[in-house]
Amino acid sequence: MMISLNGEKADARDAETIADLVERFQLAPQTILIEHNGLALHRHEWPQRPLTEGDQVEFIRVVSGG
């Protein structure tokens, strides 16, 4: 299944949910925010949020500093 990931086409492969996608890319959940089809998601929503063809997903890295 093809999705838009950070503005570029990407193959979601076997990822069925946002949580699967995070795991597939080996991202540390505590370091990212996710927007799915224009909606910001809470981390507890990731496992229940299904992916479908053409979805738009944005991974936003959180960094600390001043």
Image (cartoon, rainbow, N blue to C red):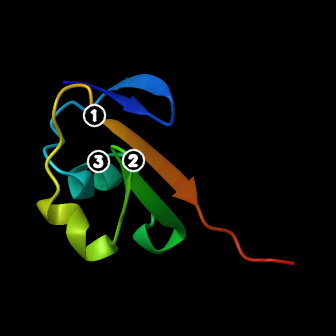
Residue 37 figure quarter: top left
Q: Secondary structure at mark 2?
A: loop
**The N terminus is located in which quarter?**
top left
| Alpha carbons under labels 2 and 1: distance apart | 10 Å
Q: Secondary structure at mark 3?
A: helix
Q: Are marks 3 and 2 in contact (CB under 8 Å)?
A: no
Q: Does any portion of residue 32 appear in the rendered image?
A: yes
Q: Are marks 1 and 3 in contact (CB under 8 Å)?
A: no
Q: Residue furthest right?
A: 66
Q: Across the whole image, how many numbered discs are drawn on residues?
A: 3
The amino acid type, in three-letter code, at marker 2 is Gly
Q: Nearer the viewer, mark 2 or mark 1?
A: 2
The residue singled out by tag 2 in the image is 38
Q: Identify whether 55 is placed above or below 24.
A: above
The amino acid type, in three-letter code, at marker 1 is Asp
The amino acid type, in three-letter code, at marker 3 is Leu
In this rendering, position of residue 5 left or right of residue 63: left
Q: Secondary structure at mark 1?
A: loop
Instruction: From the top left corner, tell me how far across and down residue 32 is, in percent.
Output: 50, 64
The residue singled out by tag 1 in the image is 55
Q: Nearer the viewer, mark 1 or mark 3?
A: 1
Instruction: From the top left corner, tell me how far across and down residue 2 is, in percent.
Output: 26, 22
Q: Nearer the viewer, mark 3 or mark 2?
A: 2
Work out whether mark 2 precedes mark 1 in sequence or the reverse, and give the earlier one.
Answer: 2
Q: Which mark is residue 20?
A: none
Q: Nearer the viewer, residue 46 or 56?
A: 56
- The residue at 15%/36% (across/down) is 14
Q: Identify whether 27 is placed above or below 15.
A: below
> Mark 3 Cα within 10 Å, few/some/many (few <14, many 20+)?
some
The residue singled out by tag 3 in the image is 21
| Alpha carbons under labels 1 and 3: distance apart | 12 Å
